[in-house]
Image: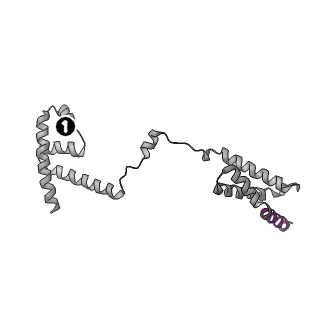
Amino acid sequence: MVVIQEEQFTKYIKQYERLIITICISFTKNYFDAEDLAQQTFLSAYTSFAKFNGINFKAWLTTIAINKCKDFLKSPARAISSLSDKDFECIRDNDETPEETLINKQKGDKIFTLCEKLKEPYRTVSLNYFCKDIKLSDMAKDTGENLKTLQTHLYRSKKLLKVLWKEECM
């Protein structure tokens, strides 16, 4: 009896597969989702085949397909949410390739190492300015030093760093 049911069901699949795919496409507007839903429809019909009353298999199968499609469309996993401008800014590409990111990190590490080699007061000014991105005006407020003095220290540290950079490259 089981073999007869399987043969009967295989005949029904071949007979109604295009109908079920068409129904699913009309609901989802997506061929790949429709394929999945058609497969789920036939699987559900196969597992429930013993419950089928034998009257109008086509109507029974299309009802299963329609219910599967409705459930799919209501599914929270399928919900499409759009990003706000703020969210989009967080995930936007920074236009840097991985290679550029690595090179910039290596340059930053090298600058830090060279700044560490400077003597005071040039070390502190260059580390704060180049590595920590602290403005000279903010340094002047924090330390109480004159802005012109810090500008002079930065100017001299740039010259010293330039010399150290060339020495490192040779």
Quadrant of the image containing the C terminus: bottom left
Q: Which residue is mark 1?
A: 136
At a point 19% along the width and 34% down the height, the residue shown is: 137
Q: Which quadrant of the view contains residue 55?
A: bottom right
Residue 75 shown in magenta? no
Residue 6 shown in magenta? yes
Q: Nearer the viewer, residue 84 or 163?
A: 84
Q: Is residue 1 left or right of residue 112?
A: right
Graded by Cα atoms within 10 Å as few (under 14), some (14 to 19) or many (20 or more), the crowding at tag 1 reads some
Q: Nearer the viewer, residue 166 or 143?
A: 166
Under tag 1, what secondary structure? helix
Kindly identify the amino acid type of the residue bearing the numbered disc 1.
Answer: Leu
Q: Position of residue 21 (x, y in %)?
A: 72, 57
Specify the color scheme: one colour
Q: Which residues are magenta?
A: 4-13
Q: Position of residue 155 (x, y in %)?
A: 12, 44
Q: Nearer the viewer, residue 20 or 147?
A: 20
Q: Which quadrant of the view contains residue 106?
A: bottom left
Q: Nearer the viewer, residue 6 or 82?
A: 82
At a point 17% along the width and 45% down the height, the residue shown is: 126
Q: Position of residue 147 (x, y in %)?
A: 14, 34
Q: Position of residue 28 (x, y in %)?
A: 67, 50
Q: Is residue 9 left or right of residue 153?
A: right
Q: Give the answer, above or below, for where 100 lies relative to 134.
A: below
Q: Give the answer, above or below, for where 67 lies relative to 5.
A: above
The main secondary structure of the magenta stretch is helix
Tally of numbered discs: 1
Quadrant of the image containing the N terminus: bottom right
Q: Is residue 99 left or right of residue 38?
A: left
